Amino acid sequence: MTTAAPRIAIVGVAGRMGRTLVNAVCQDDGATLAAGIVEPGSSLVGADLGELAGVGRLGISAVDSLASVVDDIDVLIDFTTPAVTLANLAFCAEHGKGIVIGTTGLSDAELEKLDGYAQRVPMVFAPNMSVGVNLTLKLLETAARALGDEGYDIEVIEAHHRHKVDAPSGTALRMGEVVAAALDRNLKEHGVFERVGQCGPRQASEIGFATVRAGDIVGEHTVMFATEGERIEITHKASSRMTFARGAVRAARWVSGQGVGRYGMNDVLGLDEQ
């Protein structure tokens, strides 16, 4: 691996996030766009990546196979689906490539499989690559430790566009995990993801979740700490996918100089060193 201008490949380059990632790599002087992958048999095979992304012709054609560009890339960025991501992770482990994973909706079993590659490939995995979101997670940790055991109810509210297929969002779940860990709670035991009908009064230890799916909302997350006479809300709102894409490219630059292991955005941003 090299820390200078890593050659980046993007999976799912025909999708909205894939096109945004192409744009982000092109804007980054510390990275080089080397390849873009579309689904096997796609009519977009051979299309110019720059024209797909609306940034002008780049002279790099979309391909439908990672194997065809294996010698041309250093790091793969993957914001696809769990099954595709795991297959690409296996490919990177076999061929000594780094990988940045922004895929959400992975099951516990799939997360275990991801962990199984930690000693074989350098990877950054995060449900949200936004620098602002990851700073927000640090704020939530601080707030939870200060407020959570002092009679404050905790609720996580998230909103995304109508096309998002998983709920709650990976970011909302991560926020819940951070808060739960700070309070020495287990989110699987204390998370409440549905309230319907006569569900009874709220329990003090609950961490509640509410989900909105509407229109073209890019991503909004609020964690509420509420008690008698006071409410504190910590909110992050994304107005463009570019914030996630820039974070992913930053992660790709960083991981290109790392040894094998599973890393998060805290590692990329050095937040645990603060």
Image (cartoon, rainbow, N blue to C red):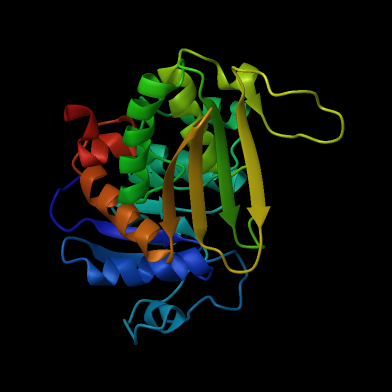
Q: Is residue 176 above or below residue 165?
A: above
Q: Is residue 44 above or below residue 169?
A: below
Residue 1 locus on image (x, y percent): 20, 44
Q: Nearer the viewer, residue 105 or 133?
A: 133
Q: Is residue 231 left or right of residue 157?
A: left
The structure residue drawn at horizontal position 42% and vertical position 50%, both measured from the top left corner, is 236
**Residue furthest top in the image:** 184
Q: Is residue 228 above or below residue 214?
A: above
Query: Looking at the rendering, which quadrant does residue 113 occupy?
Result: top right
The structure residue drawn at horizontal position 54% and vertical position 25%, both measured from the top left corner, is 112
Q: Is residue 220 left or right of residue 60?
A: right
Q: Nearer the viewer, residue 253 or 131?
A: 131
Query: Looking at the rendering, which quadrant does residue 53 occupy?
Result: bottom left
**Residue furthest left in the image:** 4
Q: Is residue 122 left or right of residue 214?
A: left
The structure residue drawn at horizontal position 59% and vertical position 43%, both measured from the top left corner, is 82
Regarding residue 118, the answer to whether it shows in the image is yes
